[in-house]
Each structure stands twice: as C-alpha cells, then as structure tokens.
Image (cartoon, coloured by chain):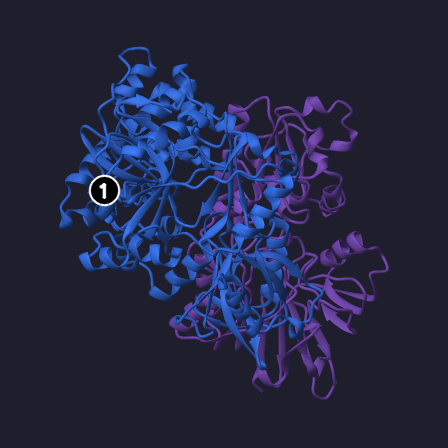
Chain colours: A purple, B blue
C-alpha cells in the first residue's frame, strides 16, 4: 500500500497510523522513534522512545534519566515489528552519518518501503557510521542546505583558516561558536587531525556531551572547562569553544581580545555571518550540501521523494527535474537553524 | 585584484571602525598607484561607470544554472553577486593560472571593452577566481560595494593616513577624480596639494539632527533662526566662472533635469536650499516634484506645467568669497542683501519666523504642521558656522508628529543585504467590510530582536506564496507610522502612504480590531484640509 495511505502529518509530527508511531515528534506522544539527539528532533516526555543506544544516551544526558517512561534501544539494521501482529509495520534503523547515534528510519508496511532520512550527511565523520543507501519506494529527505549555492568545502580547509588566524593573531582568544552536539566534537577531532594538540577550552554547556562522546570511545584530546581557568588572560591565543548563543553573551566578555569565529554551514552566506557579528566564518556542516543531496537522490533512486524541513522548494523542484515524483512536506517545529547546521 | 579582494573580505567581517581604518591604511601603504586609488574610489562609491550590467551577470549564470533554481537561490541569499559567486562553475577545464589583473588593469579593460567583449572577459575572470574574489569583482563591477565603510569614513581614513584635517579632504573631494594620484601623493608628503579653486564642485552640506524633547524645551527661540521645513529635496546650486550645476544633498549632479532653473542663474556663488515645484511663489506637492525628479530630460511641456524653483536658506560663497566661516546670522544677512539684487525669478528667500518664547515656538510648530507642503520646522543656531556633516547641537529638524494606524500584515518578503534571508519587508492592509486591502509596505521601524520575532512569525504563519512573496495568516496587527497619506489611483485601496514604518508590533491585538480603510482615508482629508 502506498505510504501516503498510512503516513500523515499531525500536529505532533510525522505519524505512521498502523504502528501508532511518531517520527521525531515535537509534542509528548505514546510511541516515538527519534532519529538523532538534536533538541528539535529529540524531546522529552514521550511514553516509549525507540532510538539507537547513543541517541538515548544523548537524550538522557540532556533531559535526565526519566526523559521517557520506557526506552527501547535499537541496533542498526535490526528490524523490530510494531502494530498489529497480523498486519505489522517493520521498522529498521540505518546509519545517517549526521552525528553520534543518528539514524534513518525504514518503515515497511503491506509491501511498500518508506525511508525517513532524518538529518544526514555524506562526508566522512569519525564520530558516526557513514550514511547507508537504503532502497525504498518513498524517500523522505531533509533539505537544510537544499539550494545550489551551498557547497561545503572540506573540513580540513576550514580548520586551516582557524589555525592560520591563530598565527596571524597570536594575542587574540579565538572564540569558536559550535553547536553542543556533533559540531563541537567534530571540530575538536578535526583540530587534532590538523596537528593541533594544545588544550582546547570549552564552555560548560558543551562539557557533558563531550564527556559522553569520550565514554563512547571517541578521543577528543585535552579539553579544559573555561570555568576552571582562574586567570582568563591566559586564554589569549587559545581556542575556546562555546555554543553560538554564548558568542555575544556576557559570558564571553571575560575572555581576552576575542576574535569571534563560528563553525556552521550557514557561514557560507556572508550576511548570516555578519548578522552574528562573526569575524571568521568557518563553513563546517553536519548536513549534506547541494551536490550531496542530489547525489543521494540519485543513489537511493526511490519512486517518490518527499522533502521536509529546510529549503523544500528547490530540492522538490530538483527531484522532479531528475524524474522523481516529488512533493514538499511542510512540517513545523524543526528549527534547524538554531541548533544544527 | 587578489589584494583588493582580501581587503574587502577582511573589511566585510570586521565590525570595529578603527580596525577597518587600520586595514585600509595598511592597504594604501603597500599598494601602488593607480590600483590603490581605484580601491578608494570603489569603496567610497565614486566609480563613474559599471564594468558590466547586472543583467549580463544573470545571463551568464543562467547559461549554467536552471532558471528556477537560480531564482530560489537568489531569493534565499538576497544578493545577486553572492548568489552568482557561489553558483558559478568554471566553464574551462584549465583556467588561466596567471595572477589576476590589478584594479587599474580591470578598469582599463572593462572601459575599453566593446559590447561583444564584455561577456568573454567577465567569464574568463570568473573562471579564474575563488568565490570570494568573484563576489568582489561582481560588487566592484556593478558599483554595489558595501563593506560598512561610508564615503565619509573614507575621508576620515585618508585624513588620518596623510595627517591632515578631514575638512581639507572634504573640501578637495569633489574636485579630484579617481584614481586620485595627485591627492594620494600629497597625503604621502610627496606632492603639492591639488588645486581645485575653479572647478564646479559640490561642497559637502551641513545637516540637522532630529530634535529631542529635552533640547526642544531648553531652546531660547531668539538665539535660533527658525524656518519651515519644506517638503522638497535639499539641493546645492553652484555657479562658478567655469560653469554652473545643481547637486543633490549627496553630491549627485542633477543639473540635466532642471535646465529651467539653471538657465535663470546669473550670479556667482554657492547656494543651499530646497528644490520644489513652484508656481510663482506657490509651492506644489512633493508628488509633483517627484515627476520632475524621475525625468532625466524633461519635456518643455512638463517644465511649463511643473516649473522648478528653489527656496534658498543658506549661502556658502558669493563672488568667489567663502562665507562658511561666518556665523549663520552674518550669512543670512549676506543672503538677504544678495536677494535685493539677484535677478532669477526662480529663486526665493526662505521665510524666517520669530517666536520669542518656547510656548510661542510650540504654537508655531502646530500651526506650521497644518500645512501639508511643510514637514515641520528647522531650527538653526544663529551663531552656527557652516560645517559639513552633522555637527551636534547646531541645527535641528522638528518634524510633524507621524500619523498612526493599526494595520494587518498580509504578505512578507525577504530583505536584502544585512537582512538577507530574514522576512523583513511587509505589506499590510486595512479593512473594507470584511476584506483586507493592502495600503502599503514597510521595511523598517523594528529592532533586530523584533525582526527575528517577525521572521519567525512569518515562517510559522505562511498560507501561500507567490514567487518570493509569502502570504501569511491575517492575524498580526502592527501600528504603522507614516508622514502623510495621499489619494492614489495606482492602488486598489485608493491611498498611498508617505514613508510608512512599523511603529509597534501589536502581538496583543486581534486582527478584526485593526483600522478600517475609511479611517485611513479620513486622514487624507484631515491632513489636506488647510
């Protein structure tokens, strides 16, 4: 049966009726599958939450142990059966390559296959398994950077910009805005890969998740909380990571001679960087850029493409040009520009 | 070009004015003539021709990118040059690896290129450039460079660079031309100061601050020259032995549009005043003046039906004698004496009022604002010297209070430049029976924080779209302020607002309680009943 007959958009989010299951619901529901731990996708207060063990760990770190009545950890590529036993929905998670624990959701019902990509990217990322191409009838893709103006440079090139700025401005504290989950850890790893082995100082809001990544066996090198630095003037010429909201906050005033840096896919658009008063924009994204979105459509090659949060119009148009049946799903509540990018 | 592009990139992302000045001074020190002069001209907005047309860029990029995707990209990025800089894909396998031409070479090759040569030249340059360099070239070539350095700050930076007074730069500025070799050589201490005494040049004007309540109450009207604030445009009439010209307040030469005024001028001097449509001594509306401003070459008929006149309120020089160092009272006296013998019927001396007390001044303001041809009062200290720019506490404008209506947001569009990607342009309407009719558009009046809230609201309340325009739920009421309302045949609502801006966002107010079109129309009558 065509997924449009068993999937719908409800106020709480994308809903699969025969499994009574919501995908990344934005309101508390009975059964939820959560693709990844970013706050606009993973919310507290559901009865049952299906997700990878890492995503569940992220949610517990953020919302506390009691973030849901019951949590059901799933392995990648291990199907679970939901709904009526005589008319079941089979759900399987596949890696999405977005952040630690991120997954795509495959739903199979009455002979048709639907894949919800969640947020995803195709670039190598040492903190998560690579995106897996999963054949399906309907592919629901995100479109955060769904415009041909978006092409993300290699992360090493952007990290070089930061390191060369440190050489040119050895007296300035380089305050880098990074989202707490995913971006922060990826920037840390990329710095280490570029040969930067000095301690990196972090804002308290990033600490818990960095520790979680370490528990998952991901080496982030020497990290020191800014709060433990007594004499802040010693941070001149050092790298400090903080959530974007802290860049212009009172918190940053104690840092010496700050050079404001921001790591986000949005930094490709000048005005975006300037709106945030960023002096050194780094284009580092945890989403696909345009060529990767197009490549993914081509490789998954579904019968039909549904496009969610982001620049739906352009990607829907592009998918149609490529010969797919395509439509935009207007979903609200996924404020991808605030926490991710 | 590499150095210039780097400079722009750094300027763009630097917010402190001092840091910007340091970057430019450093660039001036290490860049030879004539490249550095062209850079100054480009940043100050003094380039006199486009290297290529915006349309040429668009044609070229549309050979590479699908129309619809280009339109969506442009709508999102909010800026043509940047959209193209990102979308461009090199059209050659191995672009020319040699260094990019310098600014002077670019200016030369584009100004010498004929129509068929421009496209290949631009294409080969874009192929060789990074996205940032492409952006710089496209901005430079269409004279749209905005890196947060105003023409005024360029003058300050040049003054600091050369260790001279900024007044000297300002006095010279309109008499020198890019690439400013003579000027820069003087600033480097290597050459003579450029001589511009005979040139027909614009002298930077003196501007007024909006008056605040405190200053208004503390003013002793007898120490101030008080005039009506006329609803025309500020102009400077320059007449020298080498010729005569009419300049706008920003120094644009608008002589071509007003030969009827210029032909009557026989004196030598520089006058400061308001350009208006005048039938003898009667002043016509700003709307009528606009018809003249839009015409580069007005027809005889238009000049007869809408004759141009000038109300003169200040004088900068007469018969080669500069008066700017005299107090206003002395300049006014010179102006009155000049008017006793000058012969042009198109020149009129501005009226001065003489209220003796603050109370009388307040009454005067009320009376004056009843006349729609007047925007309020101008208050100028009698002892003020003529200083270009906006010196503090010298001249004030006291505008009439704005008119206000509560209107409902109907459509929203993304802004440009700094506000790119934010929904910041709003069309709002008033009720007629139970339908809303659009009455105007506003782009300003809100804070950055409110802009974010409005943007967020638009995204969550979109019910339709027409290209880049989003239609929103008719739920949000805004208090719109505007200076006047005119009847208009061009709008379905039948009204046109002058300078509408969002005064307050009424998150609390239900849309049904917004104002009715009749209320807006009644303001026409109110404001036009003399």
- Residue A71 pos. (x, y %): 80, 65
Of A27 and A30, nearer the camera is A27
- Residue A135 pos. (x, y %): 52, 72
Local secondary structure at mark 1: helix
Q: Residue at x 35, y 39 (%)?
A: B133
Asked whether residue B413 is in view, the answer is no
Of B372 and B79, nearer the camera is B372
| Residue beneath disc 1 | B262
Decide: few, some or many residues near mark 1? Use Cα within 10 Å; few <14, some 14-19, many ≥20.
many
* Numbered marks: total: 1
- Residue A49 pos. (x, y %): 77, 67
Q: Give the vertical position of A104 relative to A11 (above or below).
A: above
Q: Which chain is home to disc 1?
A: B
Q: Residue at x 75, y 41 (%)?
A: A207
Horizontal placement of B486 versus A119: left or right?
left
Q: Residue at x 39, y 52 (%)?
A: B83
Q: Give the vertical position of B447 relative to B301 (above or below).
A: above
Horizontal placement of B118 versus A91: left or right?
left
- Residue B254 pos. (x, y %): 27, 44
Q: Residue furthest top?
A: B190
Of B319 and B426, nearer the camera is B319
Q: Where does the N terminus of chain B fall, quadrant-wise?
A: top left
Horizontal placement of B359 versus B234: left or right?
right
Among the 4 quarters of the image, the one containing residue B262: top left
Asked whether residue B434 is in view, the answer is yes
Q: Residue at x 61, y 32 (%)?
A: B220
């Amino acid at each position: 049966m065509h997924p449009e007959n068993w999937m719908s958009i409800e106020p709480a989010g994308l809903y699969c009726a025969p499994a009574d299951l919501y995908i990344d619901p934005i309101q508390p529901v009975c059964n939820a599958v959560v693709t990844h731990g970013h706050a606009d996708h993973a919310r507290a207060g559901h009865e049952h939450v299906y997700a990878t063990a890492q995503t569940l760990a992220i949610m517990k770190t953020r919302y506390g142990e009691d973030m849901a009545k019951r949590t059901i950890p799933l392995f990648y590529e291990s199907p679970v059966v939901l709904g009526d036993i005589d008319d079941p929905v089979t759900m399987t998670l596949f890696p999405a390559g977005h952040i630690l624990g991120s997954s795509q959701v495959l739903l199979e019902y009455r002979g048709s296959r639907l894949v919800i990509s969640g947020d995803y990217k195709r670039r190598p990322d040492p903190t998560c398994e690579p995106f897996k191409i999963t054949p399906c009838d309907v592919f629901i893709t995100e479109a955060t950077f769904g415009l041909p103006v978006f092409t993300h440079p290699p992360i090493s090139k952007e990290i070089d910009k930061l390191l060369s700025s440190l050489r040119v401005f050895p007296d300035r504290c380089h305050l880098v805005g990074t989202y707490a989950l995913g971006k922060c850890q990826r920037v840390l790893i990329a710095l280490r890969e570029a040969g930067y082995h000095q301690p990196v100082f972090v804002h308290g809001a990033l600490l818990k998740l960095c520790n979680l990544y370490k528990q998952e066996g991901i080496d982030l090198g020497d990290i020191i909380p800014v709060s433990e630095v007594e004499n802040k003037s010693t941070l001149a010429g050092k790298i400090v990571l903080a959530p974007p909201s802290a860049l212009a906050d009172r918190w940053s005033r104690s840092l010496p001679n700050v050079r404001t840096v921001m790591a986000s896919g949005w930094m490709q658009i000048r005005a975006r960087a300037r709106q945030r008063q960023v002096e050194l924009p780094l284009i580092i994204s945890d989403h696909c850029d345009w060529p990767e979105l197009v490549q993914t459509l081509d490789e998954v090659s579904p019968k039909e493409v549904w496009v969610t949060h982001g620049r739906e119009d352009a990607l829907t148009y592009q998918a149609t040009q490529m010969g797919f049946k395509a439509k935009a799903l207007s979903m609200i509540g996924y404020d991808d520009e605030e926490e991710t990018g | 070009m590499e150095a210039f592009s780097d400079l722009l990139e750094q300027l763009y992302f630097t917010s402190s004015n001092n840091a910007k000045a340091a970057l430019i001074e450093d660039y001036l020190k290490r860049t030879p003539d004539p490249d550095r002069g062209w850079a100054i001209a480009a940043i100050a907005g003094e380039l006199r021709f486009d290297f290529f047309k915006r349309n040429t860029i668009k044609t070229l990029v549309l050979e590479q990118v699908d129309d619809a995707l280009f339109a969506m990209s442009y709508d999102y990025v909010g800026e043509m040059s940047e959209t193209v800089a990102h979308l461009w894909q090199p059209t050659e396998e191995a672009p020319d690896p040699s260094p990019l031409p310098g600014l002077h070479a670019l200016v030369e090759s584009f100004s010498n290129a004929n129509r068929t040569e421009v496209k290949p030249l631009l294409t080969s340059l874009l192929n060789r450039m990074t996205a940032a360099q492409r952006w710089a070239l496209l901005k430079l070539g269409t004279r749209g460079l905005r890196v947060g350095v105003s023409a005024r700050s360029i003058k300050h930076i040049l003054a600091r660079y050369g260790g001279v007074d900024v007044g000297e730069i300002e006095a010279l500025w309109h008499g020198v031309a890019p690439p400013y070799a003579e000027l820069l050589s003087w600033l480097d201490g290597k050459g003579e100061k450029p001589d511009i005494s005979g040139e027909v040049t614009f002298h930077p004007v003196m501007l007024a601050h909006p008056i605040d309540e405190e200053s208004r109450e503390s003013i002793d009207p007898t120490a101030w020259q008080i005039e009506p604030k006329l609803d025309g445009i500020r102009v400077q009439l320059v007449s020298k032995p080498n010729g005569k010209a009419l300049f706008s307040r920003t120094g644009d030469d608008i002589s071509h549009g007003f030969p009827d005024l210029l032909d009557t001028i026989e004196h030598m001097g520089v006058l400061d005043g308001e350009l208006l449509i005048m039938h003898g001594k009667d002043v016509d509306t700003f709307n009528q003046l606009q018809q003249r401003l839009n015409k580069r070459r007005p027809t005889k008929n238009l000049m007869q039906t809408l004759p141009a006149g000038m109300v003169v309120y200040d004088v900068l020089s007469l018969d080669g004698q500069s008066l700017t160092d005299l107090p206003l009272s002395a300049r006014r006296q010179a102006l009155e004496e000049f008017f006793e013998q000058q012969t042009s019927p198109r020149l009129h001396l501005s009226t001065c009022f003489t209220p003796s007390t603050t109370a009388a001044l307040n009454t005067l303001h009320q009376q004056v604002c009843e006349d729609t041809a007047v925007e309020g009062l101008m208050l100028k200290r009698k002892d003020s010297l003529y200083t270009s720019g906006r010196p503090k506490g010298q001249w004030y404008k006291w505008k009439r209070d704005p008119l206000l209506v509560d209107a409902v947001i109907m459509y929203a569009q993304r802004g440009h430049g700094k506000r790119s990607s934010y929904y910041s342009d709003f069309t709002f309407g008033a009720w007629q029976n139970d339908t809303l009719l659009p009455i105007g558009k506003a782009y300003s009046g809100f804070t950055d924080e409110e802009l974010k809230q409005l943007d967020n609201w638009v995204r969550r309340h979109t019910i339709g779209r027409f290209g880049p325009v989003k239609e929103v739920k008719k739920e949000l009421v805004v208090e719109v302020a505007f200076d006047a309302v005119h009847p208009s045949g061009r709008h379905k609502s039948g009204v046109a607002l002058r300078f509408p801006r969002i005064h307050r966002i009424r998150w609390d107010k239900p849309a049904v309680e917004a104002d009715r079109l009749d209320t807006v129309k009644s303001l026409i009558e109110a404001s036009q009943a003399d």
